[in-house]
Image (cartoon, rainbow, N blue to C red):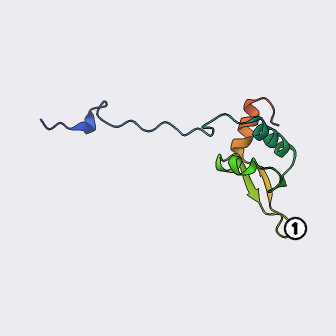
């Protein structure tokens, strides 16, 4: 019983759901860091939450004028999180 699965919508594997930007809830420290970044980039080592936010794609590192002083700013996804909370510009 060899069936052609290309024409059978049940047999064709469904596309995986679009990956969302957040896989978990943000902590209050992470939300506070996003709020700080809403107003201006901050030093890359200023907050311990930066690494987690970078992994989630909510912040990114940008070069700074000062040697070795990288800055962190919001990504469009980070802005979208704040907009969802009614906080972004």
Q: Quadrant of the N terminus?
A: top left
Q: Residue furthest front?
A: 48
Q: Position of residue 3 (x, y in %)?
A: 17, 36
How many numbered marks appear? 1
Q: SS class of the residue under badge 1?
A: loop
Q: Dot 1 corresponds to which residue?
A: 66
Frontmost residue, 16 versus 7: 16
Q: Position of residue 51 (x, y in %)?
A: 71, 51
21 lies left or right of 12: right
75 lies left or right of 35: left
Q: Residue furthest bottom?
A: 67
Frontmost residue, 72 versus 79: 72
Q: Residue furthest left?
A: 1
Q: Position of residue 41 (x, y in %)?
A: 84, 52
For the residue carrying disc 1, how many other residues have a C-alpha within 10 Å: few (<14), some (14-19), or many (20+)? Answer: few
Frontmost residue, 61 versus 48: 48
The residue that appears at 77% across and 59% down in the rendered structure is 62
The residue that appears at 62% across and 40% down in the rendered structure is 21
Question: Above or below — where is 26 with respect to 73?
Answer: above
Question: Above or below — where is 55 with respect to 66?
Answer: above
Q: Quadrant of the C terminus?
A: top right
Q: Position of residue 12 (x, y in %)?
A: 31, 36
The residue that appears at 72% across and 47% down in the rendered structure is 75
The residue that appears at 77% across and 37% down in the rendered structure is 31
């Amino acid at each position: 019983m060899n069936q052609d699965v290309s024409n059978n919508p049940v047999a064709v594997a469904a596309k995986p759901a679009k990956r969302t930007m957040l896989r978990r809830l943000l902590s209050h420290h992470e939300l506070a860091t996003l709020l700080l970044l809403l107003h201006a980039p901050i030093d890359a080592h200023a907050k311990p939450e930066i690494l987690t936010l970078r992994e989630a794609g909510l912040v990114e590192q940008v070069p700074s004028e000062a040697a070795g002083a990288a800055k962190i700013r919001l990504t469009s996804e980070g802005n979208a999180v704040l907009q969802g909370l009614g906080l972004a510009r």
